[in-house]
Amino acid sequence: MDKEMIKALRCLGSQSCMGDCYADVYNYKNRFDVKAAYMCCGEANKENNWIGCPYYQSKYETCIDDGCEWLNKVADILEGKTGGDEDGR
């Protein structure tokens, strides 16, 4: 099981309808809470009171700049496991 791929999928699946990622939504909701830690797209940094996003991974990137070419791999895996028909149904 590729845990990094699962995190990458969860990252995409957690995006708001405006395309904001989980960390962006978390930070926006907590923007006026001075005690809330800032969530970064990366590893936690306790010195700056930053928490790491639970969906952060570096293997598949974030898809923002270069697209998600690895999604084709995911589609292939899912088709193999679900036995999809040739016409996509």
Image: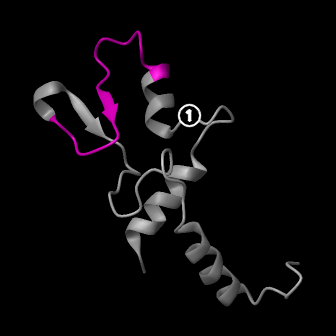
Quadrant (top left, top right, bottom left, bottom right) of the C terminus:
bottom right
Q: Could you say where residue 35 lies in the image, as x and y percent from the top left?
A: 28, 16
Where 75 falls versus 26 (above or below)?
Answer: below
Q: Answer with left or right where residue 25 lies relative to residue 41.
A: right
Name the residue that disc number 1 marks.
20
Residue 53 locus on image (x, y percent): 36, 43
**Residue at horizontal 47 percent and vertical 30 percent from the top:** 24
Q: The disc labelled 1 sits on which kind of residue? A: Asp
Q: Quadrant of the N terminus?
A: bottom left
Q: Does residue 24 lie above or below 55 as drawn?
A: above
Of residue 14 and residue 33, the one placed in the foreground of this image is: 14
User: Which quadrant of the view contains residue 81?
Assistant: bottom right
What residue is shown at x 50% (from left), y 45% (from top)? 64
The magenta segment is 28-45
Q: Is residue 66 above or below residue 35?
A: below
The chief SS type of the magenta part is loop
The quarter of the picture where residue 19 lies is top right
Give the image location of residue 12, x and y in percent: 56, 51
Colour convention of the picture:
one colour
Q: Residue at 44% across / 60% down in the picture?
A: 7
In this rendering, would 25 be left or right of 40?
Answer: right
